[in-house]
Amino acid sequence: MGLKNIIESLPTNFVQLFNSYISAGPTLLKNFIFLFFISIIFIGGLIYRLSLKNLELNNECKNKLIALGVIILLLINPSVTIYDFYLFIPSFFYLVNVIKFNHLPIDQNVFKYLLMITCIIVQDINLPFLLSAISFFYIIFYSFKNVDVLGISYGKR
């Protein structure tokens, strides 16, 4: 479970489309793919933090950054266990409540309830990875457009 298992099964599943076979398990290529994804996520999080205008943050902004940090840790953790969800679920619910989804074609409140109900209805072990990737890349994408979806002010780049 986690990014490690997704990367390990990705080349095998892709090659099966062409009726070929590659043995599953760790290889040098899979390790490079893993390091590439982790470096992109880490650099995106670092650029997001460095783009904040004020370095003196209040407690609410610190809570938002801690919740985002937990989401990033779930994304880069190679082997996710059930105990990691004790941190992920409250952080995800907090981020869903504070993120401004004004840029989506669907109503903001309806989208928030859909995300929360998805956590309850879908009992898949990879769902937290999907939801954390969606929320992380939504925040990073709009931070590059200088749109403040978390309510923390940005500086000029």
Image: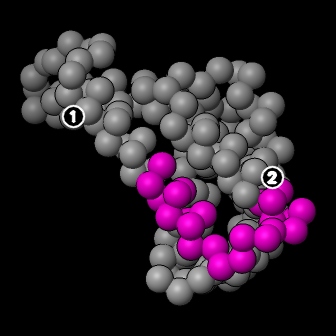
Left or right: 30 in relation to 141: left
Q: Position of residue 145 (x, y in %)?
A: 49, 82
Q: Position of residue 119 (x, y in %)?
A: 73, 44
Q: Residue furthest bottom?
A: 156
Q: Amino acid at mark 1?
A: Phe
Q: Amino acid at mark 2?
A: Phe
Q: Earlier in the sequence, mark 1 or mark 2?
A: 1
**Residue placed farthest to the front in the image?**
56
The quadrant where residue 24 appears? top left
Circle 2 Cα neighbour tier, 10 Å, few/some/many (<14 / 14–19 / ≥20)? some
Residue pointed to by mark 2: 93
Q: Is residue 58 magenta?
A: yes
Please say which color scheme the image uses: one colour
The reply to whether discs 1 and 2 touch (Cβ–Cβ < 8 Å) is no
Nearest the eye: 42 or 105: 42
| 61 displayed left or right of 129 | right
Residue 125 lies, with reference to residue 131, above or below; the image says above
* SS assignment at label 2: helix
The magenta segment: 42-64
Q: Please name the residue that numbered disc 1 is placed on.
A: 14
Q: Main secondary structure of the magenta part?
A: helix
The image quadrant of residue 28 is top left
Closer to us: 123 or 133: 133
- Residue 145 higher or lower than 51, as above or below: below
